[in-house]
Image: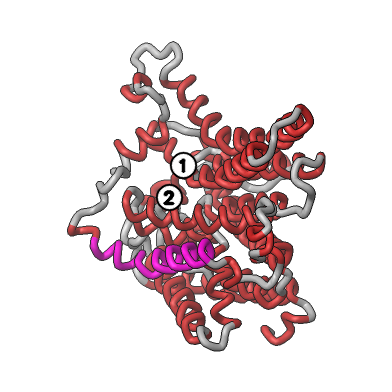
């Protein structure tokens, strides 16, 4: 199957995707031989845990919150930790399904099934978009194929098959970077349109997962590049007008990225703070954001709050992915040529003091955001989630794919592939049995 990738890469990726998903779903069904650790699924769906049903086996951990939010909206304050885009989309599809006559038990089974289907579809399109993005940036078919293949067998495993935001986030993030890397002259109308369109896609990604705010980095880099070009030569009326026009795209794009976080939090502020008889404590903060409060108050997220002896095993589980993200991010920042033989990695522009291209900025921004995410995971997040949120950051896929294509580092790449497969399968058994890590 893999031997045909040179002539039919997309078809091969789809075949690998279907085979891998089939294996993971079989693992989930097979876990039914043992009782689940938690009864939340049976309480929500009003089903027996022993039922041989994919919906029953896949509705675990945060997937329950997403499905409930899709069925009846946010009911409790802590549910605002789960961004509303996915539940709203699933809820809309569920309403359409009911209009078309699809049976609904009224307990969330329909929303759960639709959420599972959406996760699978988003993951498949994310795979194909990553392939296209890699081809556009580096023009290397083998690198693009292997990067997309690695995204399929990600350590995230079943998390990309259930109503979680990770697969949808990856799709919108990859699509945003694909649009952002269009080869148009900086400041042109098409370039500006690409910047704004990418910002809209990143805004949706941010509305799915708050770490999408890191996708604002390329817009900040573009603004700095434009300002540096303006200030490095005598300022004239024409150059000032050109720089102002060029800034429109990245400024609007950056605002759209931020809106993915601001708009949902403004909705929460209207509900809990504006005119409420008893405003919540977070309403009086300098920045009255519900998301940071809920994460801190209900989920124990905060700077170094996860650094306890009891969490050492979770840091150990996250260590391989953290090491990959940090090592690949730093190496690509220092030496972009490790990935590409294309102009993206050229040093001639720097030698001639020519501003970096938009594609160079995309690659550097992705490496920087990946490194920052790893640091945040170590210092602030529930560290074990890095194995699933890393799926939306392609630099480590590119780096491992480069290792697989490099005779000197091929053994390292193969070890990463082995780790990904083993971790995903073991995690699949644990997830379907309602056991940590989650």
Mark 2, residue position: 62
Residue 25 spot, x, y in % from top left: 53, 69
For discs 1 and 2, the disc positioned in front in the rendered view: 1
Q: Is residue 286 left or right of residue 357?
A: left
Q: CA distance from mark 1 to mark 2?
A: 8 Å
Residue 21 spot, x, y in % from top left: 58, 70
Q: Is residue 132 left or right of residue 327?
A: right
SS state under label 1: loop
Q: Is residue 225 above or below residue 58?
A: above
Residue 438 spot, x, y in % from top left: 38, 58
Q: Is residue 143 left or right of residue 77?
A: right
SS state under label 2: helix
Q: Residue at x 32, y 51 (%)?
A: 379
Q: Is residue 356 above or below residue 142?
A: above
Q: Is residue 178 left or right of residue 295?
A: right
| Quarter location, residue 274 | top left
The answer to whether marks 1 and 2 mark residues whose Cβ atoms lie closer than 8 Å is yes
Farthest left residue? 309
> How would you classify the magenta stretch by its main secondary structure?
helix
Q: Assess whether residue 104 is covered by the magenta stretch.
A: no
Residue 89 spot, x, y in % from top left: 62, 42
First along the sequence among labels 1 and 2: 2
Mark 1, residue position: 82
Of the pair 185 and 381, the residue shown nearer to us: 185
Q: Residue at x 26, y 51 (%)?
A: 306
| Quarter location, residue 275 | top left
Of the pair 89 and 356, the residue shown nearer to us: 356
């Amino acid at each position: 199957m893999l031997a045909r990738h040179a002539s039919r890469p997309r078809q091969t990726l789809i075949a690998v995707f279907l085979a891998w998903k089939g294996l993971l779903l079989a693992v989930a069904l097979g876990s039914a031989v043992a009782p689940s650790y938690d009864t939340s699924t049976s309480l929500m769906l009003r089903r027996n845990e022993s039922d041989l049903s994919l919906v029953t086996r896949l509705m675990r951990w945060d997937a329950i919150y997403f499905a409930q939010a899709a069925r009846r909206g946010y009911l409790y304050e802590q549910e605002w930790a789960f961004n509303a885009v996915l539940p709203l989309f699933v809820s809309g599809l569920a309403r359409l399904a009911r209009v078309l006559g699809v049976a609904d038990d009224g307990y969330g089974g329909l929303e759960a099934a639709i959420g599972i289907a959406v996760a699978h579809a988003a993951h498949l399109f994310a795979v194909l978009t990553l392939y296209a993005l890699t081809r556009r940036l580096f023009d290397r078919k083998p690198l693009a194929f292997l990067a997309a293949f690695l995204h399929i067998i990600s350590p995230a495993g079943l998390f990309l098959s259930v109503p979680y935001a990770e697969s949808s986030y990856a799709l919108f993030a990859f699509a945003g970077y694909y649009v952002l890397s269009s080869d148009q002259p900086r400041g042109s109308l098409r370039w500006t349109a690409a910047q704004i369109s990418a910002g809209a896609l990143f805004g949706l990604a941010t509305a799915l997962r708050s770490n999408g705010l890191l996708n604002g980095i390329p817009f900040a880099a573009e603004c700095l590049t434009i300002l540096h070009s303006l200030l490095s030569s005598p300022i004239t009326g024409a150059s000032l007008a050109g720089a102002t026009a060029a800034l429109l795209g990245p400024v609007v794009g950056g605002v759209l990225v931020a809106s993915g976080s601001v708009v949902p939090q403004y909705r929460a502020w209207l509900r809990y703070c504006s005119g409420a008889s008893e405003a919540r404590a977070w309403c009086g903060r300098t920045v009255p954001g519900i998301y940071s409060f809920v994460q801190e108050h209900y989920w124990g997220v905060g700077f170094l709050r996860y650094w306890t002896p009891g969490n050492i095993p979770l840091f150990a589980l996250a260590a391989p992915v953290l090491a990959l993200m940090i090592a690949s991010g730093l190496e690509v920042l220092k030496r972009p040529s490790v990935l590409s033989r294309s102009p993206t990695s050229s040093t001639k522009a720097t030698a001639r003091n020519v501003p970096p291209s938009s594609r160079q900025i995309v690659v550097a921004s992705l490496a920087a955001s990946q490194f920052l995410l790893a640091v945040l995971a170590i210092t602030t997040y529930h560290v074990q989630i890095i194995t699933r949120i890393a799926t939306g950051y392609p630099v480590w896929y590119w780096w491992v794919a480069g290792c697989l294509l490099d005779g000197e580092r091929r053994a390292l790449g193969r070890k990463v592939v082995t780790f990904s497969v083993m971790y995903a399968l073991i995690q699949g058994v644990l997830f379907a049995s309602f056991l940590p890590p989650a």
